[in-house]
Image (cartoon, rainbow, N blue to C red):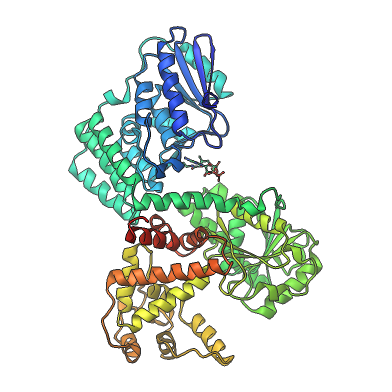
Amino acid sequence: MTNDLIRRSDSDGIALLTLANPPVNALGLAVRQRLAALTAQLEADESVRAVVLTAEGRVFVGGADIAEFDRPPEAPHLPDVIAAIEASRKPWIAALNGAALGGGAELALGCHYRIFADTARLGLPETSLGLIPGAGGTQRLPRRIGLAPAIEVITAGRTLSAAEAREAGLADRIAAGELIPEALAFARTLKGALPQPSPAAPLADPGPAFWDEARARIARAARGNPAPAAALEAIRVGVAEGFAAGLRAERETFLRLRASDEAAALRHLFFAERAALRPAALRGIEPVPLTRAGVIGGGTMGSGIAAALAAAGLEVRLTETGPEPLAAGLERVEAIFEAQVQRGLTDRAGAAERMARVAGTVGLGALADCDLVIEAVFEDLAVKRRVFEELVRLCGPEAILATNTSYLDPERIVEGLPHPHRFIALHFFSPAQVMKLLEIVPLTATAPRTLATGVALAGRLGKIPVQAGNGEGFIGNRILKRYRAEAEALLLAGATPTEIDQAMRAFGLGMGPFEMQDMAGLDIAFRAREAARALGQDLPEGPGDRLVRAGRLGRKSGGGWYDYAPGSRLPQPSPEAAALIAPLVTPGPRPSGTEIADRLIAAMAEEGQRICDEGLAQSPSDIDLVEVHGYGFPRHKGGPMFHAARKTRSRTGGA
Ligand code: COA
């Protein structure tokens, strides 16, 4: 079937090659073989004077075949295929019907001309997979668009739109109408010498200060992913020592990183994220089409959810109990859109459009014609239950009714209410307009269609859905509880909050467990423990209890695990907290930095495994997605389950 991967049709001396390797025309071995053979054939064919290379579907080429990266590379290698195209005596015109990413962008860069459909784009996202471009991207892009812009595109994994590519000098034209006829017509006009190939283009070295500054900036943004700095180095070699040396450095680094733990971790997440959006159990089940969504509660969570829904194009009704809280809720939504403008995520007109999709209402009456309602009111069973009792009276039986509870049992919220097939828990993470994780918890009577709608909604919001069973804390908060307990155990073994937080930062988390608790406040968990004690649970007095009883609730009270100077967020070691903890510490050897991180990650992985064993998560990858997208686990470590499995494998020598 190899022949079908690239179709050739000739007319008027122009060969049109159409890649057809769904879903994304990845450049796997068979495609490379066929392209190499075609390149040689076309070169020898005197009836052909130009070649137009395009592809079928919405994507031009989504890159190398990522699934091949777990195996040794096999010839013909992409850099050689591209070099042969670039060296052709005949003009090759890349006609980009859609995204040209990674190897696809490199292939387009090797062609002599590029024509973009107006929806096409070009980017080198390899660093987000722990790699660097491996087929000339680090050498050809700077020679086409200039050093500084190329460094940005490559190290940040940024994608250029057709208009940006045109401006940067990368697109020879953007098709005004139909891409293929225009590309063929363009090919017919070509006469005379080919444009100067990339290898011959000069590139001036801006000097050591430029590279030092770039190195420092890129390392800061990379948060432990080694790929961006490695890409910069390959670019630098190409500038200092020329195209050929740059190409060699690039390939060497690419092959080294391809075999690294970080790249394996990022590949694992790439596939897990895509699988999460298409659960096998829901194949063929049509989600309910959503146009209008109600959000109940305009607090931090409700306003964040409303903003996320409106940004995704849904018409939103945000409801509150009275005019004042409603005005405050709408202000919160507006502030979110304003912040999005400040960060360049949308422009003023876009923000105004989003806001225009949010209507505020008092009471639930206006939710009667919503396709979906998400309740985000106070975490109190009776309050939530009243909301649902009213909703089932107002909304039709097909409207999907969701609770955003974190800790209550959703079954109890809707117990006994009619049409239970449409109830579900959709657990957003704060800030809901930012955090990518959406835990989706079906209840015993939830219909597959309701579940499929939750998953589709996550996709529409640009979030990652993870199905969780209905157990306390679902997946994420249950692991968080275990993680915090382990952090306290380390404290009682003599490690300080500073040592523990620093160990986790060094591992790659944005924040350690104690600074995080200080930020969120220690009182909520304390109250939950006190409530459990009141119900007869035997919970021994822990260090967190002692802090709260001494009035140390976290940053908001001026101190918790740490002290804070007035107005400062900088945690300072606290002698008072240390004195409160000291009586609980057992004498013995103090855990070291790596031991601390190892124990904390192992605790997360153990709890994750237990959750899988209990059937509350569908796979270890789902645990990883929860931690990466909801709790700041570093992407390049792949999640606690991936990390633990990799560690075990390396300890047992890969057995
Ligand atoms: N290699 C292998 N498989 C790939 C792939 C690649 N480079 N790119 C995408 N796929 C697969 C996905 O795993 C998915 O498979 P599934 O249907 O079995 O889940 C399928 O192609 C569709 O991908 P998806 O991302 O869901 O489609 P999309 O239309 O939303 O986006 C792209 C298309 C090309 C924009 C997107 O897939 C992408 O960004 N791919 C990776 C690009 C990249 O990093 N390339 C550099 C490789 S070194």
Name the spot of residue 609 as percent of width and height, x first.
Answer: 49, 67
Q: Quadrant of residue 243?
A: top left
On screen, residue 126 versus residue 433, left or right, reads left
Q: Is residue 283 above or below residue 35?
A: below
Note whether residue 627 is visible: yes
Q: Is residue 34 above or below residue 490?
A: above
Q: Nearer the viewer, residue 273 or 291?
A: 273
Q: Nearer the viewer, residue 460 or 425?
A: 425
Q: Quadrant of residue 389?
A: bottom right
Which residue is found at the position 60% from the left and 68% from the top?
Answer: 328
On screen, residue 36 versus residue 467, left or right, reads left
Q: Is residue 152 above or below residue 461?
A: above
Name the spot of residue 161 as percent of width and height, x first.
Answer: 48, 36
Name the spot of residue 417 as percent of width and height, x first.
Answer: 78, 72
Which residue is found at the position 37% from the left and 62% from the top?
Answer: 648
Residue extending farthest top: 46
Name the spot of residue 40 as percent of width and height, x first.
Answer: 40, 17
Quadrant that contains the C terminus: bottom left
Residue extending farthest front: 655
